[in-house]
Image (spheres, rainbow, N blue to C red):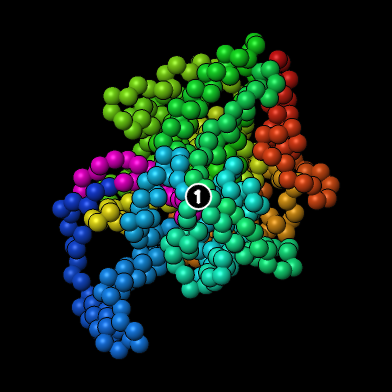
Amino acid sequence: MRRLEKLGLVGLGLFTGVALTIHLTAVAQKDTLATPLPVEEMRAFTDVFGRIKSDYVEPVSDKTLITQAINGMVGGLDPHSAYLDADAFKELQSSTQGEFGGLGIEVGMEDGLVKVISPIEDTPAFQAGVKSGDLIIKLDDTLVKGLSLNDAVKRMRGKPGSKILLTIIRKNEPKPLVISVTRAVIKVQSVKAKLLENGYVFVRITQFQEHTGENLASALEKLFKENKGEMKGLILDLRNDPGGLLTGAVGVSSAFLAKDALVVYTDGRTEDAKMRLTANPENYIRSSGKSDYLKGLPEAVKSVPMVVLVNGGSASASEIVAGALQDHKRAVIMGTQTFGKGSVQTILPLGNNTAVKLTTARYYTPSGRSIQAKGIVPDILVEDPSTTALENAFRLREADLDKHLINDTQAEDKGDSKKQAQVIDKPEDNKVAPAEFGSKNDYQLNQALNLLKGMQILHGK
């Protein structure tokens, strides 16, 4: 099979826009039928097909039946494999550019209903109050039960400026909520950065896009120049970052790691599914002949004390970055356990502008840990005081999704990983209003800043 491009996209389910875990590959002259087709099963398929054509109460086109059969065949494998029709394939391609149409939520399917993995920051759904873990039961007047995920996503798309009513079941709420969301062209700013105070940098990545690595490098160069004196600490915020392009994850990791350090490796049944990606320009620069955007970074970026913030909404590309920096002991990971999506999906174009998104590999941190259905356990556990214990208990993770892949290294773990994290107690368990990430009221951010300042004291600075 001829590999066209390493377009690793690592995220979750379908956005109303999309975040996935992907390589874009061409279907060439590969013997995909190494074993003979099961005759009896194929006969049963054709018998059912014929019965529907002849006896169903209304006429059904061949195209509709075959498309639905493909959807069922692929969608029954795991939560992330799917058949992409022309519209879904086009939206997937546009979402990696950082601009796409929709509501700005990342969703998955569970028991025939749509579950919100995470609203994307600064999007209509986020601003309307849609929350991670919400269960969408109705789209306008249409019940979600019985729709495929692709069908539900299509209904959530629409002309920018048009409205849709989402009927939502939310834990702790006595009755369903009806939320009006105005569709828009979603433009996601993937990198936000600022000086918290002199000597301390805050960088937030909301999604890994085509230019995330370049934007990170530009932001760091600017802030290191603005800072007066020595840079004392850096906080990388990956909370609620659902993933994105694998090249973006490798580029971000490479900014902070030594050249040629292993960032992530993948393993699957085919040779194309086996990769070792290191902190090397060939693994994070997609266009040949393009210069290395990390080349001009200040040397201090590689050594400045660093904390990475994560939570249950940090997934895929976020987990790759956190896992690499944790394994190389480059940063302290702080927050709560991540989502746990450690599988790779490959986009296989099929012609007629359609494709199949197929899970082809698992990815592993440099030390050989599989994140699948487990996630990254922080070095220091710091909960968000604005969430209740019940909300945390019902937080959706990869392990909660129907037909999720198992963690093939789980049996090798020794001890209870949750008990290995140090714990910083949160304030009294009174309900606190949610704080904007990066604001002065952001409790987890303040704990990260305190840790960096403590590290300065311990090092005699």
**View extreme (left): residue:** 29
Residue 334 or 460: which is nearer the viewer?
Answer: 334
Left or right side of 455 for 326: left
Tell me the quarter of the picture where residue 455 sits: top right
Q: Is residue 366 visible?
A: no
Please tell me whether residue 40 is drawn above or below residue 291 in the rendered image.
Answer: below
Q: Residues within 10 Å of mark 1 (few under 14, many from 20)?
A: some
* Rendered position, 265 above or below 305: below
Kindly give the residue lying farthest to the top in the view shown: 229
User: Along the horizontal axis of the image, is 170 left or right of 342?
Assistant: right
Q: Looking at the image, is 39 positioned above or below residue 364? A: below
Q: Residue at x 31, y 78 (%)?
A: 60
- Quickly name the residue at label 1: 160
Assign a secondary structure to mark 1.
loop
Q: Residue 68's spot in the image, x, y percent?
A: 34, 71
In-front residue for pair 412/244: 244
Check residue 16 for magenta coloring.
yes
Q: Residue at x 80, y 51 (%)?
A: 431
**Closer to us: 221 or 340:** 221
Image coordinates of residue 343 in percent, x first then y, are 43, 51
Find out whether residue 294 is within the magenta segment.
no
Please tell me whether the stretch drawn in magenta is mainly helix, strand or loop: loop
Q: Which residues are magenta?
A: 1-24
Dot 1 amino acid type: Pro
Q: Residue at image x 47%, y 48%?
A: 101
